Every structure is written in C-alpha cells, then in structure tokens.
Image (tube, helix red, strand yellow):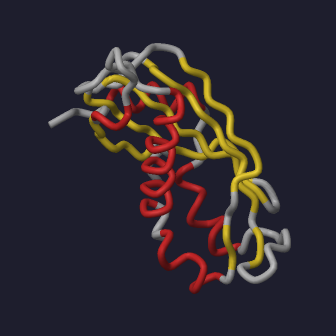
Amino acid sequence: MSMPPVPVLVREPVRWGDVDPVAITRFDAYTRFLEIGEDELWRAAGMPLHGLQEAHDVWFPRKLMHVDYLVPSRLGDMLTVASYLSRVGTSGCTLHVDTLNDDATVLHAAAHLVIVCVTRDGFVKRDIPEVLRTQFAPLVITPEEARSRARAVPRA
C-alpha cells in the first residue's frame, strides 16, 4: 500500500530583509518563500532544479502566480512553507506554496502558480515527460488535505 501524498515542508524564519519599517513581512518578500517551496518540491520529486534542464531537456517557467495574503508575518516568526501540486496536466502543473505559522495551524499566505513545460532551447511548450509525471504523482494533493497533513507533522 502506498503512502498518501503529503506536502513538502520547510521551516524558514522571517528575516530582516523580508520586513517593512514596522516589522511586518512585505508582500513582495513572499516570493522568496515561494522559491524555497518550489525548490524543495522539485528536490522531493527527485529532480533538483540544477539538474532538471540537462536530464530532461525541459524547463518549467511560471505562467501565472497568485498570492492571497491572509495573516501578517512578523520579523522573527518561524514559518512553515508547505509546497505541493494540486494538478498535473498534459503540459502544465498547478503548484501551491502555503506559508503557515510554525506549527502549521494558521495560514499566513496561500499561493498557487501555474507552471508550463517547455523545451530548454527556444522555450517551446511541450508535454511533460512521462518520467516526470510519475515523479510528480506522490506530490498531488488538494489544498485542504495538504494543510491538514501539514498540521499533523511533528515539529522538532
């Protein structure tokens, strides 16, 4: 029996460079959390970004990025960054990156990105290689399930 999908979790503090003069995380600083989540998702799928292009002759640029800012994060907060896929299509995926408080009980920001598979040379849209689709499968989960499972993970 296979394990149910789980989000990829990373703990990351809100740093000085992330905040405005009143120590609240700036909206544009969340892109750093999105990049951390996306990088760790690729790594969990067995495809660190530094080798993806060479190994499969593809790249996944962002077509859309949407962020809902729900609760402000503050300087020094330890956040849980949860990343997962909710959809894998023929040539694209919907990638989610949730930014939650340290014990994953409060959602601070919810982002989703649509990424599209393209050729490395020329950025021509193409189907996602089957080997990558297989590696993505354990990371596909609904946002509701991902947030519930993130809360259930013990913290050190």
| Residue 43 picture location, percent across and down | 43, 63
Taking the spot 54% from the left edge, 50% from the top edge, the residue there is 139
Left or right of 88? Residue 84 is left
Say which quarter of the image contains residue 127: bottom right
In the depicted structure, whether residue 114 falls above or below residue 75: below
Residue 1 in view, yes or no: no
Taking the spot 39% from the left edge, 23% from the top edge, the residue there is 20
The extreme front residue here reads 21
Taking the spot 70% from the left edge, 73% from the top edge, the residue there is 130
Image quarter where the C terminus lies is: top left
In the depicted structure, whether residue 19 falls above or below residue 133: above
In the depicted structure, whether residue 31 falls above or below residue 62: above
Total numbered circles: 0
Residue 143 in view, yes or no: yes
The extreme left residue here reads 156
| Residue 2 picture location, percent across and down | 47, 53
Q: Nearer the viewer, residue 133 or 66?
A: 66
In the depicted structure, whether residue 127 falls above or below residue 32: below
Left or right of 77? Residue 36 is right
Q: Nearer the viewer, residue 7 or 4?
A: 7
| Residue 30 picture location, percent across and down | 49, 35
Taking the spot 69% from the left edge, 60% from the top edge, the residue there is 61
